[in-house]
Image (cartoon, grey):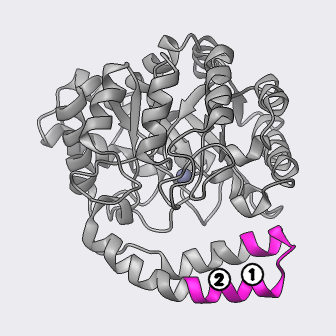
Amino acid sequence: MRSQTSSVPNDLLIFDAHCDTVHDLVDPSIDFRKRTQGHLDLKRCQKGGLKAQIFALYVNPVYAPHRSLKKALMLYQTLEKKIFSPGYGMKVTSTAEMDQAIRKNKLACWLALEGGHIIENSIDILELFHSLGIRCLTLTHSKNTDWADSSGDSPRWDGLNALGKKIVTHMQELHMVIDVSHVSDKTVESVLDVTSAPIMASHSNARALCDIPRNLPDSLIKEIAKRNGYIGVNFFPVFLKKTIYDQASRNVQKYKQQHQELLRQKPDDPDFISKAESDLFQKYVIGNDHVDVNTLIDHIDHIANVGGVECVGLGSDFDGINSTPTNLPDVSSYPALIEGLSLRGYTTKEIQKIMGLNLYHFLKRFDL
Ligand SMILES: [Zn+2]
């Protein structure tokens, strides 16, 4: 791996903790085998050497309180139709199943829910998703839920409230991964108080390098690592560099004005609002200030220095972000990251850990 070649050794496990590809696949014209848009499809997974991926079923909080469940089930059905039925990938719910999928040369697909509002405040619905094979829940998206505070909203519950604590405790019993990306610092602290489980921040960066609420402070990186948890670095330039975040924030003011207008137009149509929000995001929240793979590696370095090299790995957020580091345009470009890590002085063993083994071992420690 120290050579300057751009190919990936076949025995290297590349395993990423977060992508939003399912959302794009809902469009009937999009084929998972090969597509021209977006970041991830089968052909590019094979080119980049990706062997396993956690696919998020993201539901915009505008579907709360009563229409999120249906939306998430439709996303689940999309995965069935577009990836599992045609045999392009295998749904996996354990590391043993993941090993099997990889032996069969299939993309190993883990499933996660992104946004605690999806379970509509119901332990029964949480259990329903578990029985469908979902093994991870991101507690919030960018809005507070009825039981947990988000880093993107004003504090309401001081972390988790009583229902939140009950849900998180039940997730630990079910062996469902507790994902703290997007939540507020107080919520991470509450989670650490109520569980003894190792926890995950599937797609979060280091606040010491990019000081925004969406990233993790060193104190929480340390705590997550001490608990044998996992932190996947997010490739979004807006979360990698503060100047880019500030530039995007200025545009968000325009976003907000137009967003208010949309809400007035069709307040009861979450499909309309969700699509329009996504279009506004594409237009205004971009980060194209020539961040390259080295800025991403700075975050990996920092998290490894604070928490140890065993706690850090990939959490690309591919297909959930509208810009990427210049030499990491999509999933086929993982060789550039491997080469960058090698040039930074990481050993072959350390690179194996960061590119996938750390996430694999984290799930194994969680008895998955
Ligand atoms: Zn996200």
Q: Residue at x 52, y 54 (%)?
A: 318
Provide residue 244's location: percent of width, then percent of height.
31, 72
Q: Residue at x 67, y 85 (%)?
A: 260
Residue 212 shows in the view: yes
The quarter of the rendered structure image containing the C terminus is top right
Badge 2 local density, few (<14 within 10 Å), some, or many (20+)?
some
Front residue of 54 and 153: 153
Asked if the residues shown at circle 1 and circle 2 are in contact, with their CB atoms under 8 angstroms apart, the answer is yes
Provide residue 313's location: percent of width, then percent of height.
36, 35
Q: Residue at x 39, y 35 (%)?
A: 231
Q: Amino acid at mark 2?
A: His
Mark 1 Cβ inside 8 Å of ligand 1: no
**Residue 259, label in figure:** 2
Provide residue 253's location: percent of width, then percent of height.
48, 85
- Magenta segment: 256-274
Provide residue 257's location: percent of width, then percent of height.
59, 89
Residue 170's place in the image compared with 241, above or below, is above
Q: Quadrant of residue 88?
A: top right
Q: Amino acid at mark 1?
A: Leu
**The residue tagged with tag 2: helix, strand or loop?**
helix
**Residue 291, label in figure:** none
Badge 1 local density, few (<14 within 10 Å), some, or many (20+)?
some
**Could you tell me what secondary structure mostly forms the magenta stretch?**
helix
- State the residue position of label 1: 263
Q: CA distance from mark 1 to mark 2?
A: 6 Å
Left or right of 3 in this view: 48: right
Front residue of 245 and 166: 166
Left or right of 276 in this view: 250: left
